[in-house]
């Protein structure tokens, strides 16, 4: 249940939040409501296999998500975009942990023990969680980190991107590392680097591009190494 709720957040807040919806959500309350209706549906569906009657937890997570996203329409603290993004995610994960604790799925007093037990009993869910992370969540994290480090600004969405190529690249790298085939990682990276580099040089985005590429590879390798330990 613990990793199912984390996976529900990754799917609802990233995989099923396309560029148009993200832009709408950042401007209007209607967009936030549409986004949170997806959060509610995904959270409910992911909770059903574990307990079909946990509607209180689903409502709590969805309502808190609505509040956290809606308040950002009216309160925009003067902090870097990366910090704002990380605080937003910290708030969402805190709510999820609190809901699981109240529901008896993750005792606060022995959270480490609870997480260890969940890791042992939900290994398949952990693999799904790892691969879900290297898709859209990693793409957004790479964008925020790279733009913050290089330009000190929020990323431009959708901007110049081969989103799905980058996602496929991370999935392949994660799989190579998981299988112990580290020598294949450069072979996965080089085709995109060779095809995109001339255009990157013409646009003068070499530093940003390289930081994005290295950040993406690093995340995929880390997830692969973590999954390899399961």
Image (spheres, grey):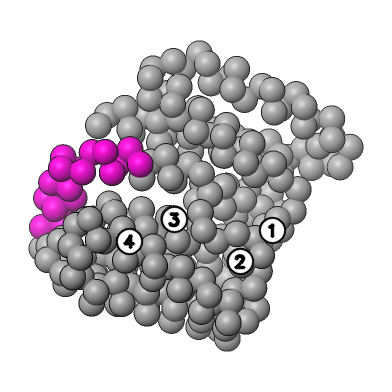
Find residue 33 and name its label. Answer: none
Does 124 sit above or below residue 96? above
Q: Mark 1 and 2 residues: CB-CB less than 8 Å, in contact?
A: yes
- Going from N to C along the chain, the mark reached first, 3 or 4, is 3
**From mark 2 to mark 3, how far is it between C-alphas?**
14 Å
Q: Quadrant of the N terminus?
A: bottom left
**Horizontally, is 25 left or right of 95 in the view?**
right
Residue 96 visible in the current orientation: yes
Tally the marks: 4
**From mark 1 to mark 2, how far is it between C-alphas?**
9 Å
Find residue 45 and name its label. Answer: 4
Which residue reaches farthest bottom? 74
Q: For numbered disc 3, what is the local secondary structure?
A: helix
Q: Which residue is mark 1?
A: 157
* Residue 76, horizontal then vertical, whole percent: 58, 79
Q: Which residue is mark 3?
A: 11
């Amino acid at each position: 249940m613990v990793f199912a709720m984390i996976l529900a957040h990754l799917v609802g807040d990233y995989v099923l939040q396309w560029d148009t919806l993200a832009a709408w959500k950042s401007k209007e309350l209607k967009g936030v409501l549409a986004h949170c209706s997806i959060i509610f549906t995904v959270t409910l569906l992911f909770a059903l296999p574990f307990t079909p009657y946990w509607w209180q937890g689903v409502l709590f997570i969805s309502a808190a998500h609505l509040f956290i996203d809606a308040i950002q329409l009216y309160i925009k603290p003067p902090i870097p975009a990366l910090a704002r993004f990380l605080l937003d995610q910290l708030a969402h994960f805190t709510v999820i942990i609190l809901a699981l604790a109240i529901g008896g799925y993750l005792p606060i007093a022995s959270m480490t023990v609870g997480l260890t037990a969940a890791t042992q009993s939900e290994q398949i869910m952990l693999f799904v969680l790892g691969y879900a992370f290297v898709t859209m969540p990693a793409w957004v994290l790479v964008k925020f980190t790279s733009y913050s480090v290089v330009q000190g600004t929020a990323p431009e969405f959708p901007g110049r991107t081969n989103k799905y190529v980058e996602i496929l690249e991370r999935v392949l790298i994660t799989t190579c590392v998981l299988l112990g085939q580290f020598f294949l990682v450069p072979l996965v990276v080089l085709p995109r680097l060779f095809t995109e580099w001339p255009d990157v040089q013409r646009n003068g985005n070499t530093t940003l591009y390289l930081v994005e590429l290295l950040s993406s590879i690093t995340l995929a390798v880390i997830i692969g190494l973590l999954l390899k330990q399961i």
